């Protein structure tokens, strides 16, 4: 369903299990950034009423996910660490050249958002299937389903607002680029890295 060109190495879960506090901190900040991103769509493209409504809901949902991750950390006696740069997201955001029409900018941002959600979904699936901690695995199963819905929503909006053939061509180019990004990044205790 996700059409990612390079699946995550299942051994990534072993790294995660040895660094639960780090992955939870990274995950919490990913949720916070996703909420901020939803708000930036509202600010940047207020004339798209359907998008604004969806992004309003998404911002609240992502902040509720942040709270759930933070609550898990507190329950385990862990603390939210400092935010780190997300090299994966940074690289994806610079794939499309700046400039172009307002609609093109919107479509590009929607495609990048779709891919980030898609990779998160894939990683959450792995965690839900491979983590020895069954409570955490169940938590990631729920979030995987949510991320799949976000992935579909962003991709559908891109296709709705842009020319379908051009959007699909851009999507394939972005997927190819993301494959290389995933090869280049080291395997770490981050959601995307």
Image: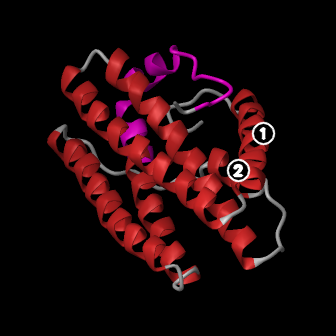
Image point (46%, 59%), residue name: 34
Label disc, if present, on residue 177 of the rendered structure: 1
What secondary structure is found at the residue carrying circle 2? helix
User: Toward the viewer: 79 or 50?
Assistant: 50
User: Does 14 appear in magenta?
Assistant: yes
User: Toward the viewer: 142 or 64?
Assistant: 142
Image point (50%, 46%), residue name: 117
Reply above or below: 23 against 25: above
Q: Residues within 10 Å of mark 2 (few under 14, many from 20)?
A: many
* Label 1 – label 2 distance at C-alpha: 8 Å
Image point (51%, 15%), residue name: 10
Q: Which residue is mark 2?
A: 92
User: Does 13 appear in magenta?
Assistant: yes
User: Toward the viewer: 31 or 178?
Assistant: 178
Reply above or below: 97 against 141: below
Left or right of 171: which side holds 98? Answer: right
Left or right of 64: which side holds 121? Answer: right
Q: Quadrant of residue 6?
A: top right
Q: Earlier in the sequence, mark 1 or mark 2?
A: 2
Q: Is residue 124 visible?
A: yes
Q: Write the start and end of the magenta stretch as one range.
A: 3-26
In which quadrant will I find the C terminus?
Answer: top right
Q: Residue 167's spot in the image, x, y percent?
A: 72, 53
Reply above or below: 89 against 51: above
Name the outermost residue toward the left: 75
Q: Are marks 1 and 2 in contact (CB under 8 Å)?
A: yes
Q: Quadrant of residue 124?
A: top left
């Amino acid at each position: 369903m996700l059409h990612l060109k390079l699946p995550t190495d299942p051994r990534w879960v072993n790294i995660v299990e040895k660094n639960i506090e780090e992955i939870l901190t990274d995950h919490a900040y990913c949720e916070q950034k996703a909420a901020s991103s939803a708000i930036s769509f509202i600010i940047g493209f207020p004339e798209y009423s359907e998008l604004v409504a969806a992004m309003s809901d998404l911002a609240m949902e992502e902040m509720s996910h942040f709270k759930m991750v933070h609550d898990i950390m507190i329950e385990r006696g862990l603390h939210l660490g400092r935010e780190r740069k997300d090299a994966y997201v940074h690289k994806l955001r610079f794939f499309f050249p700046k400039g172009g029409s307002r609609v093109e900018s919107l479509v590009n941002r929607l495609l990048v958002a779709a891919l980030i959600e898609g990779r998160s979904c894939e990683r959450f699936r792995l965690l839900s299937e491979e983590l020895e901690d069954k409570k955490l695995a169940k938590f990631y199963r729920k979030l995987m389903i949510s991320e799949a819905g976000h992935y579909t929503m962003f991709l559908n909006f891109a296709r709705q607002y842009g020319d379908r053939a051009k959007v699909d061509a851009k999507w394939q180019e972005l997927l190819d680029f993301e494959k290389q990004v995933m090869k280049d990044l080291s395997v770490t205790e981050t959601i995307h890295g």
